[in-house]
Image: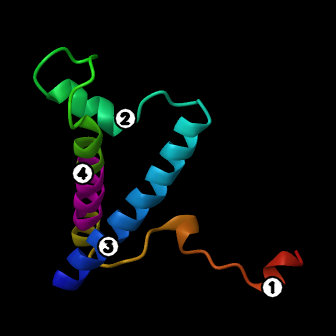
Amino acid sequence: MMRNLVHGVVSGAVATAAMSAVMVAGERAGMMPDQPPKRIVRAALPGHKHRRKPGEKALGAVAHLGFGTASGALFGLLTRGRQAPGLARHRVRADDLDR
């Protein structure tokens, strides 16, 4: 059980880092004016939900990582270490490509 929990936390952190990279790329490309975790934190902090607040960027990053690792931990516990169903488990062999 503890092994599944730790594996889930690590997997959640890695997935969160990958998602963060995509969000930063979107922000730099001008496709995303604000990061969603930062907007969530901004709305949760006291004051007007659309005005910038001190520390919201750092709190947004911590909240994003916390949510990702907690979700990964929960997934690890619920699946008991089993692999995901469907295409995630499918391994392509060389002879599959000839068809």
Q: Secondary structure at mark 4?
A: helix
Q: Which is closer to the viewer, label 2 or label 4?
A: 4
Residue of label 2 = 36
The answer to whether residue 62 shows anywhere in this view is yes
Q: Which mark is residue 62?
A: 4
Image location of residue 94, percent across then percent down? 80, 85
77 relative position to 91: left or right: left
Q: Earlier in the sequence, mark 1 or mark 2?
A: 2
Is 73 located above or below residue 80 in the figure?
above
Tag 2: amino acid? Pro
Which secondary structure lies at badge 2?
helix
Q: CA distance from mark 1 to mark 3?
A: 31 Å
Measure how far apart labels 3 and 2 are at the Cα level.
22 Å
Q: Which mark is residue 21?
A: none
Above or below residue 85? Residue 24 is above
Residue contact between numbered discs 1 and 4, judged by CB atoms under 8 Å: no
Q: Does the image show residue 1?
A: no
Residue, disc 1? 94
Q: Can you give x and y, in whole percent of width and height, for residue 18 in the image?
A: 48, 59
Front position in the image: 91 or 66: 66
Residue at 22%, 59% (x, y): give it.
70
Q: Amino acid at mark 4?
A: Val
Residue that mark 3 sits on: 10
The residue mark sitting in front, 1 or 4, is: 4
In the picture provided, is 97 more to the left or to the right than 31? right
Q: What's drawn in magenta, residue-wise?
A: 63-74
- 98 versus 73 height, above or below: below
Residue located at (74% from left, 84% from top): 93
